[in-house]
Amino acid sequence: MITAVVALLALLPTARSTLASKGRIHQGQVEIKSIVAAKPARSARTITIALEPAGTIPLEFLKRAPYLSKLKFDGSGNIYLRTYSPQERKNQVQWFKLDPTTLRHEKISIPGMHGDEQLGEIALGDHGKVYAALALPTRRGAIAMIAPNGSLVSRIDTGSFVIHKLVVDRNGRLWASGQLFEASAPDAKLADSQIRVYDQSGQLLAAPLGGLEVGDSSLSEFAVDDAGAKFISHSQSALYQFVDTAFESAYRRPFESSSDMSQDNLRPTSPEDQREVDGIVNLGQMRLWWGRIETKDGTAGESFVGITTAKGEALTPEVKLPAEYASLAGVDGDGNIYAYSRNGDNIGLKKARLILSEK
């Protein structure tokens, strides 16, 4: 019996496939010509996945939040979640820190934030540090580094690069995906969608990848492990892998179809359905992928998990989760999955432990 714990992934090359012409991904000025596919595992190992329900965490402070984010987890058992209320004109985005044991929660405040500045993504660093991406309507970005006591440690000006996704790697470097504008002005034109790397002092170390689909800079996700940073591209169904601050390779995601976890309803998912990978979690020598399935007509509403080796070789098909876990929001370092549940105005996090059995 294997239970889960958190970090990430590396994939194995085989067959090649050409990038769509509209996705002109480039490293500096060099266009990436192909994405390498991962191959299925050749071993005789059989991994089965089961769920052990673990109750629901009430989120009474979120009753009027129409939009909720994927979760982030720190090393102390706390959960971070974001709400978004489009009815409000200023600072619609709010981040909360929740202790799921005591249910104590607190709103994360950003010291020194300008009145018309918008709070975006946050990233969690070592020893309780929080990094927050900020943006002005003038197409100007920044990163605020906040100490565990809530004080402002530093503020990094990213100029006309506006950040959508942010993560801290094992060396303390800040990886950001976002949009680079031609100038810092409200009507400035978009120059590029790219990935950038900053050090703790705010120095730009590298811009290892550019030419991303516009949606990739905001909808895709980062992942980090001992091997380096990774970027999960939704538009290309691929994972870009970096070593130090340089692009290394691009890999196709490993799964092609899904099966339903319900014993009475085992059915494959159509290859035409779109998988949105939302995260990759380290399970010892294995990796757990989790995300959402959208049908070809754009209908969403199912979530999946799947297991690969550390090299990306599939050990299971993608497994659809039961309907009550359709709004999958995250997987923590102890192998627990969390899904949002709504009952009228009441919002909760339905929790379950993923149980992996190896034969």
Image: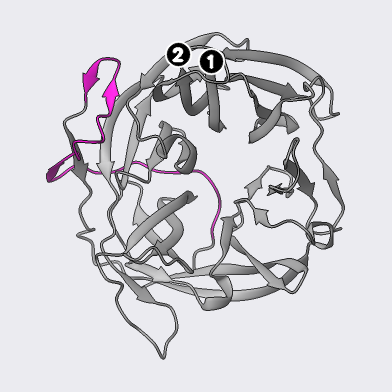
- For label 2, count other residues whose C-alpha is less than 10 Å away and answer few (under 14), some (14-19) or many (20+): some
Q: Is mark 1 on a helix, strand or loop?
A: loop
- Is the stretch drawn in magenta largely helix, strand or loop? loop
Q: Quadrant of the C terminus?
A: bottom left
Is residue 82 left or right of 203 when viewed as pictured?
right
Q: Which of 126 and 118 is in front in this view?
A: 118
- For label 1, count other residues whose C-alpha is less than 10 Å away and answer few (under 14), some (14-19) or many (20+): many
* Magenta stretch holds residue 254: no
Which residue is at 45% across, 83% downward? 262
CA gap between label 1 and label 2 equals 7 Å
Q: How far across and how far down the image is residue 345, in percent?
A: 78, 69
Q: Nearer the viewer, residue 200 or 356?
A: 200
Which residue is at 38% across, 60% downward? 307
Of the two numbered discs 1 and 2 in the rendering, the one whose residue sits closer to the viewer: 2
* Magenta stretch holds residue 11: yes
Res. 109 image quadrant: top right
Residue on which the image places disc 1: 160
Under mark 1, the amino acid is Ser
Q: How far across and how far down the image is residue 111, in percent?
A: 82, 23
Colour setting: one colour
Res. 60 image quadrant: bottom right
> Magenta residues, as a range?
4-31
Q: How far across and how far down the image is residue 339, in percent?
A: 61, 65
Q: How far across and how far down the image is residue 53, in percent?
A: 63, 76
Q: Which of 96 and 331 is in front in this view?
A: 96
Residue on which the image places disc 2: 182
